[in-house]
Image (tube, rainbow, N blue to C red):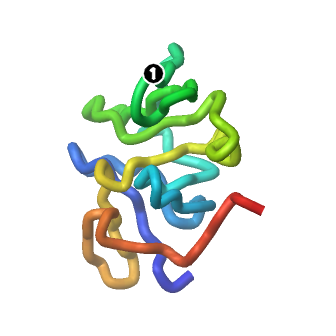
């Protein structure tokens, strides 16, 4: 792929994942949705229940950077109908990660990049 990228934590630059495991982008939530992440990502064993804003009406596990403890995303456990397609995937907040573009050998904020259109909605 032309734009291969590694996803890194903004807090400590630990590698969290890569664009080869990217399966969707969710602009409403500002997340990159991945099939797989590295061992540098851990998740809480307790569910967070949304009572306001996002994740209103949803239950999710928080994803953290194992190196620095920064919250970098979530895994939806239960969701409203419009977000049900994200259940079980690793959702990384674009404003919490950096992208190292392999071909260009540069690092940019994930909020400044758009990967080719991918969607989980049929």
Residue at 46% over, 80% down: 3
Residue at 49% over, 39% down: 39
Tell how many labels.
Answer: 1
**Is 51 placed above or below 120 here?**
above
The residue lying toward the viewer, choosing from 36 and 113, is 113
The residue lying toward the viewer, choosing from 20 and 93, is 93
**Is 71 placed above or below 110 here?**
above
Left or right, residue 122 beside residue 79: right
**Which quarter of the rendering shows the C terminus?**
bottom right
* Disc 1 crowd, CA 10 A, few/some/many (<14, 14-19, 20+): few
Q: Position of residue 14 (x, y in %)?
A: 32, 47
**Is 102 placed above or below 21 here?**
below
Kindly identify which residue carries mark 1.
51
Q: Residue furthest front?
A: 52
**Which quarter of the rendering shows the N terminus?**
bottom right
Secondary structure beneath dot 1 equals loop
Residue at 22% over, 45% down: 12
Q: Position of residue 58 (x, y in %)?
A: 57, 28
The residue lying toward the viewer, choosing from 1 and 77, is 77
Left or right, residue 122 beside residue 91: right
**Is 19 placed above or below 45 here?**
below
């Amino acid at each position: 792929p032309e734009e291969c990228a590694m996803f890194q934590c903004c807090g400590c630059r630990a590698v969290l994942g890569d664009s080869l495991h990217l399966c969707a982008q969710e602009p409403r939530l500002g997340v990159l949705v991945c099939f797989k992440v590295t061992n540098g990502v851990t998740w809480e064993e307790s569910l967070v229940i949304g009572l306001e804003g996002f994740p209103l009406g949803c239950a999710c596990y928080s994803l953290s950077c194992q190196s620095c403890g920064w919250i970098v995303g979530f895994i939806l456990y239960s969701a409203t109908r419009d977000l049900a397609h994200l259940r079980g995937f690793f959702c990384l907040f674009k404003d919490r990660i950096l992208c190292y573009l392999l071909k260009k050998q540069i690092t940019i904020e994930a909020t400044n990049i758009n990967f080719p259109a991918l969607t989980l909605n049929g």
